[in-house]
Amino acid sequence: MEKAWIAVLRKEALSELRLRSSLITAILFAVFSVVCISFATYDLQISPQLGSGLLSLSMLFAAVISLPRVMLVEVESKTIDLLRLMGNPGDVFWGKAIYNLIFMAFTSIVLTLLFLGFTHVGVGNYALLAICMAGSSAAFAGTVTLCGALVTHASNQTALAGILSVPLLLPLSFLAVSGLRVALDVQGTFNAGNGMIAGLGLLSYGLATLAVGPYLFAVVWKR
Amino acid sequence: MLAVRNLSKKYGRRWLFRNVEIDLEVGDCLTVIGPNGSGKSTFLKCLVGLVDPTVGTVTWNAEYGYSALDLAVYPALTAREHLELAGQLRGIPANVTPLLERVGLSYATDQLAGEFSTGMAHRLKLAMALQGEPKCLLLDEPGAGLDQTGRDLIAGIIEERLNSGSVVLATNDPLEYQFGTLTLTFPM
């Protein structure tokens, strides 16, 4: 028999494939942000510092506008009770977090490819870029799922999830900028070691939020 | 099977119910009656753990299934996928075909729940509640939104359940009172 968290993941994927609400929002956001950046800087060479900031910001917003819906939509549509009757918090959290991770990885790849294709930004270290993208995807997915999960019983979930995510997303954004700055540095100006530390920090951050999420979610699971 | 001790629920300054004590055994049918807003549904939600009581304990010694009018289904999933999801989450076989046949919904096995009428969604929730043959069945307003055939089906399922387990009904439907061996009245 399929594991329970895989059943939750399957449910999320089927719902998204049929409704396409979050996917279209994230892709449209990625396209719009890259088009705007490309239009504003068409005759400029974007520095790695600026490029890393713009790319991190685009990923952050793509995550924030789409990922919390995976948890909050259950509350809004009152299907959360169905899950609470049948499932346990660990399975529900893992299913949703892994779905968010896949979704975020896909969005990050699309966003980065568009960004590199439409702006004058080069890549100095492809391995570090891949680590940063994987780390960012894990960290964004873990953090945003956790924030969405923690506010399921609050009266104004969307606003509260946004406020709660600020202190968690701020260090994550710093790490993403630090790592991407080195990855996008074609001329070798920045210390590659610092970039690798930031990339691994992102991965660790993601794994940490994914690891503690089920325990924190279990506390708020039963009303 | 079910032991309820000193169960009380307060919203704001108003007690919905206080000091409810119940012992439910095989063959018992507890009928909870009362006007709208008297706390019948909240009482059932306290029994299944969807709402925390203000005071008191609920102890189950058996599996239970729960179906309620205000329980939502996933609009983008089919009836089959609902039962598969429920089975996988509980770690029990899905039994899609027999369950949907039992509640008279086999014709809509692969139809999205978002296209269901209220009565069809009600039948799907009932099928999920019956999954795994739980000893106790808790039904909140079981006849609401159903036609006469559906109400007869509910009556048949209640009778069948009472042979091997117990049933808790929250209802204002006089036709469903007939099953009650125990009655709990919630005044407004």
Image: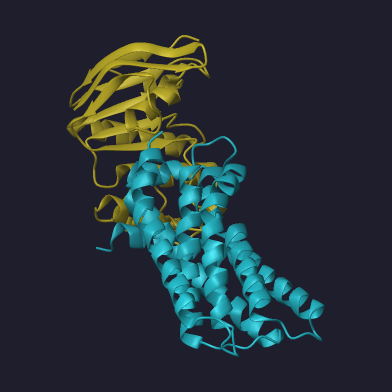
Up the image or down, A186 lies above or below B51; here it is below
Residue A9, position as x, y percentages in the image: 41, 62
Up the image or down, A174 lies above or below B118; here it is below
Residue occupying image coordinates x 61% and y 76%: A111
Up the image or down, B183 lies above or below B61; here it is above
From where the camera sits, is residue B116 visible? no
Residue B95, position as x, y percentages in the image: 28, 56
Q: Quadrant of the N terminus of chain A?
A: bottom left
Residue B82, position as x, y percentages in the image: 40, 54
- Among the 4 quarters of the image, the one containing residue A4: bottom left
Report whether B68 appears left or right of B27.
right
Up the image or down, B17 lies above or below B60; here it is above
Please tell me which residue lies in front, B66 or A47. A47
Q: Quadrant of the C terminus of chain A?
A: top left
Please tell me which residue lies in front, B40 or B98. B40
Total marks drawn?
0
Residue occupying image coordinates x 28% and y 63%: A2
Its colouring scheme is by chain
Residue A118, position as x, y percentages in the image: 71, 85
Please tell me which residue lies in front, B111 or B152. B111
From where the camera sits, is residue B5 visible? yes
Q: Please tell me the colour of chain A.
A: cyan
Residue occupying image coordinates x 19% and y 31%: B163
Q: Please tell me the colour of chain B.
A: yellow
Please tell me which residue lies in front, B16 or B84. B16
- Among the 4 quarters of the image, the one containing residue B7: top left
